[in-house]
Image: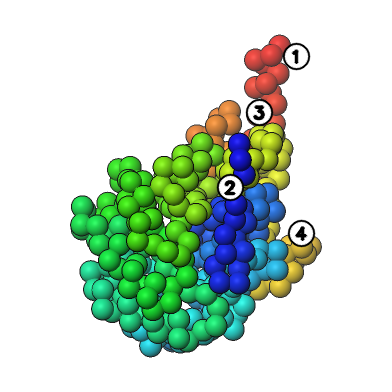
Amino acid sequence: MTPRPGFKVGPITVDPPLLLAPMEDVSSLPMRVIAKRIAGPGLMFTEFVSAMAIHHGAEKTFRKMRIHPEERPLGIQIFGGVPEIMAETAQHCEAAGADLIDINMGCWVPKVCRTGSGAALLKDPEVATAIVAAVVKAVRVPVTVKVRAGFEYGAFAAPDLVQRFQDVGAQMITLHARFAKQGFEGQADWDLIKQMRKVVSVPLIGNGDVKSGEDAIRMLNETGCDGVMAGRAAISNPWLLQSIRCAITGEPETAKPTLDERLEVVMEHARMMVAYRSDSDTLAEAKELPTFAECERRAITSLRGQLPLYVKGVFGASEYRARLSRVNTLAELQVVMDEVRATARDHETLTTGA
């Protein structure tokens, strides 16, 4: 297969043309570093950063802007409904080292939309455009926008909006090919991305239902987009990103990870999260960190939605998923991982007769 070329966003080269989506409570720094080490996506994004929280000095939100040297290039995604406060937040992101600033106009969650942020901006073109213009004026790094197709189902508002965004300086557009009212229901309509290609002159990224390398190639071929963004399918599965990368670059497909490799990544992710939550600057030292009980508990519980997905498909997975949703410490997690490994080996011995 002919390798798919990368593209540029201002001075930033995105190569390969594979992007990891911003996902709240998922795409934290530890998850991104693991994804970069295993799969090497061309561009990744932080969790959503609330402009209002930054404006009021929320320490937890400032932590989301921490960047590790391994994960570049990195975009910090911000959301909010007030142009001046979004511009102020963008300046904080630039100071933190962001390679680009991405504006969230796709989050459909009611508590976000009620504030006039996220996908709610699709209903207010004047404010949406004012926000993009204010952020572009406030920073030197490229500004990009992630949108849904529109707010109400079937009302394809994005083409008109993104033309406005381009006119005021947006340098990349990502389209999640669903409407805000759909949430994650139904199938993404990739034909919407194809229609967007006709009006978007900057790089266009397709997002929605990319679950395999074959999906990525099909999206590129059918829509003419410049790159593909993977999100939910990559949660606790950096090897999916690796498979997509191989498909779009023409590299030989890598071997699927062994169970031992998967379980090692579980522990690595958890140790990194403890380091991250304790504000350690050196993730490489995560194994030697002293145990801070409260920090450790918060770190491990924050991963309860992700840890069970790592053991999907292993023998006895349903039992282990339930237990992983209750672990509180690294030691408890290690016990479960050891049992998963031992049970899998016992099952293999029984089924093969070895």
Residue where numbered disc 2 is placed:
4
How far across and down, in percent of the image, does residue 284 sit? 76, 63
Q: Report how far apart the C-alphas of labels 4 and 3 lie in the structure.
A: 26 Å
Residue where numbered disc 4 is placed:
287
Residue sitting at x 69%, y 36%: 252
Name the quadrant of the C terminus.
top right
Q: Is residue 269 visible?
A: no
Circle nearer the N terminus (3, 2): 2
Residue where numbered disc 3 is placed:
344
Q: Report how far apart the C-alphas of labels 2 and 1 lie in the structure.
A: 45 Å
Disc 4 residue type (three-letter): Lys
Mark 2 is surrounded, within 10 Å at the Cα level, by few (under 14), some (14 to 19) or many (20 or more) other residues, namely: some
Mark 1 is surrounded, within 10 Å at the Cα level, by few (under 14), some (14 to 19) or many (20 or more) other residues, namely: few
Residue where numbered disc 1 is placed:
354
Quadrant of residue 279 within the rendered picture: bottom right
Circle nearer the N terminus (3, 1): 3
Disc 3 residue type (three-letter): Ala
